[in-house]
Amino acid sequence: MARIDTAKLILQATDVADRAYYVRQDPAVIKAAREAWADLAQARRSSSRLVMEAGSAWRRASDRSRSKACAEPGRSPSELSGGSADLRKRASSDYAHARTGA
């Protein structure tokens, strides 16, 4: 098994830390980091607006379909929305007609 040269390992670790510090202080890196943070903040705001608008549109679509269902003459909203009792009656009636051929 090979031995680890600790002095060489310490020297390499120190070199990496020094280089990372130097890169972190570079003006171009600082500028790019500021721009990236600003872009991330804007993306967060845009995403929040997207979620809010999608929720509003979803609620508007619900209101629209509810008012459209109530606007049909001669049918109650529960009939149009597909109340479970009505669906069962219609399904059993359709099934009976299909089996008898009527």
Image (cartoon, rainbow, N blue to C red):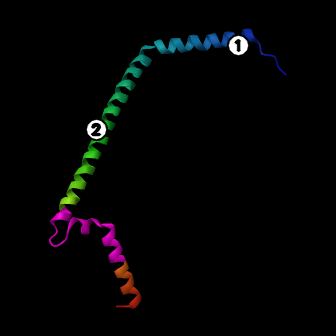
Task: Give the residue number, with chain letter if any, for mark 1.
Answer: 9
What kind of secondary structure does the magenta stretch mostly adopt? helix
Q: How many marks?
A: 2
For the N terminus, the quadrant is top right
**Residue 30 point in image, percent of width and height:** 42, 17
Instruction: Pick the residue in front: 63 or 11.
Output: 63
Range shown magenta: 68-91
The quarter of the displayed image where residue 70 is located: bottom left
Q: Residue at x 77, y 12 (%)?
A: 5
Instruction: Pick the residue in front: 102 or 43.
Output: 102
The quarter of the displayed image where residue 9 is located: top right
Residue type, label 1: Leu
Q: Secondary structure at mark 2?
A: helix
**Residue 64 point in image, percent of width and height:** 20, 57
**Numbered tag placed on residue 44 in the rendering:** none
Task: Give the residue number, with chain letter if any, for mark 2.
Answer: 49
Q: Residue at x 16, y 73 (%)?
A: 74
Instruction: Pick the residue in front: 91 or 24.
Output: 91
